[in-house]
Image (cartoon, rainbow, N blue to C red):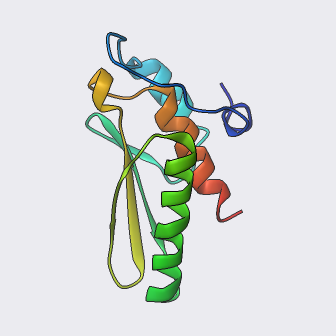
Amino acid sequence: MEACALEGRRCVPCEGGVAPLDDAACGQLLTQLPGWAREGQAIVKTFTFANHYEAVAFVNAVAWVSHREDHHPEVTFGYRDVTVRYWTHAVGGLSENDFICATKVDKLLA
């Protein structure tokens, strides 16, 4: 599935009982997300900004995406950097929702 196909998609509620995506599916989806990497059962990307104000503004924009999609990442930030980590707790790994949201987060800076 291509990133542009993910861009127009919305997250679907996940209550568990569904298997996480397998390694092949995750690998294929990651090829569509430059800068994102798989770390264990999550996908992660660090963004760097000119200053703290821009970093915090980005964190707030990620929170907006998370709220709209009802799919929430772990977000950590420092003076100029923001790290976003997605995984789906309910499935114990990665779901399509993680890749949909990662695509939308990238689009914030396009």
Nearer to me, 94 or 91 = 91
Quadrant location of the N terminus?
top right
User: Where does residue 64 sit, x and y in percent of width and height?
Assistant: 55, 58
Indicate left or right for 88 with 102 as reference: left
Q: Position of residue 3 (x, y in %)?
A: 67, 37
**Is residue 89 depicted above or below 14 in this figure?**
below
Q: Is residue 7 above or below residue 14?
A: below
Determine the residue positioned at 47% across, 49% down: 36
Residue at (57, 50) in percent of width and height: 34
Name the residue located 35 percent from the left edge and 32 percent from the top edge: 88
Would you place residue 13 above or below residue 75 in this image? above
Quarter of the figure with residue 103: top right
Picture coordinates of residue 70 (x, y %)? 48, 40
Is residue 34 positioned above or below 55 on the image?
A: above
x then y, percent, for residue 97: 50, 32
Q: Quadrant of the C terminus?
A: bottom right
Residue at 29% in and 31% down: 89
- Total label count? 0
